[in-house]
Amino acid sequence: MKVILLAAGMGKRMNSVTELIPKPLLPINGIPIIDSFLFNISKLGFSEVTIVINHLSDLIIEYCGNGSKYNVNIKYIFQEKPDGTGSAVKKALNNEIHDVMVIGGDTFFSFDHYKKSIETYKKSNADGLIILKEVSKSIITKTSLVSLNEDNFITNFIEKPKLHQVDGNIGSALFHIYNKSFVKYLADISLSERSEYELTEATKKMIEDNKKIIGLLMVSPLDLTDVKDLLIHNFSYINKILKKG
């Protein structure tokens, strides 16, 4: 299985911080997100990781190096322009055919997220798996609205839905696993309304073609959407202050 970390984004909503430090190097609970990812992947027995980079890429390369401190080999792929997660994964795969795991570089997934996802994917005999989370209506407009059937297979995706489209509270995390058939669908994606090649467009094509993508609802992983998240996830007393306010 090829493991890909998406770490090219600029983090525009945190621009006052991310103009200096790329999101994957920012901490949650005092631990850089990229450290958590690499140590967890190594613990699970993976020996190679591909990291897609762009914004402040030199800092990521300098910090992670060749991966030896994590006991993995890191391959870096440069995404020339910010044209979407689908484009980033295409570049990382480079027409190779693999089972693939794609992780967002701005989200702090626990070891349990990784372990349970891989176990569930293997046991389910599904064509793919995506970690799901319960989210509020205001937040779901910034992620993907997901519909499930009674067997927890995904039946529909709406990427960054408009408020009037929101009829549920299940969103997706950027933690996807796919079998080899995924590569064919990724090759067929086109530009979205936001002028991006979106990873979930390939997922939708798979679902339309009766491929089975299982949704795994888990405790919501911690992520960094704005500067407030950075403060809350690293200084517990600030969270208490904000709740009182």
Image (cartoon, rainbow, N blue to C red):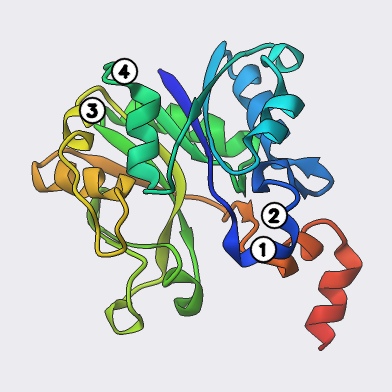
User: Which residue is label 2 attached to?
Assistant: 18
Q: Earlier in the sequence, mark 3 or mark 1?
A: 1
Q: Are marks 4 and 3 in contact (CB under 8 Å)?
A: yes
User: Disc 2 marks which amino acid?
Assistant: Thr
Residue 57 in the image: state x and y as whole percent.
Answer: 63, 35
Front one among 207 and 50: 50
Q: Residues within 10 Å of mark 1 (few under 14, many from 20)?
A: some
In the figure, residue 169 lies in which quadrant?
bottom left
Residue 187 in the image: state x and y as whole percent.
Answer: 19, 33
Q: Earlier in the sequence, mark 4 or mark 2?
A: 2
User: Which residue is label 3 attached to?
Assistant: 183
x 26%, y 48%: residue: 153
Distance Cα–Cα, label 3 vs label 1: 33 Å
In the figure, residue 25 lies in which quadrant?
top right
Q: Earlier in the sequence, mark 4 or mark 1?
A: 1
Can residue 119 be seen here? The reply is: yes
Q: Are marks 3 and 1 in contact (CB under 8 Å)?
A: no
Task: Tell me the element at label 4.
Answer: loop
On the rendered image, what quadrant is the C terminus found in? bottom right
Q: Earlier in the sequence, mark 4 or mark 3?
A: 4
User: Which residue is label 1 attached to?
Assistant: 14
Q: Which numbered disc, 3 or 2, marks the residue closer to the eye?
A: 2
Task: Tell me the element at label 3.
Answer: helix
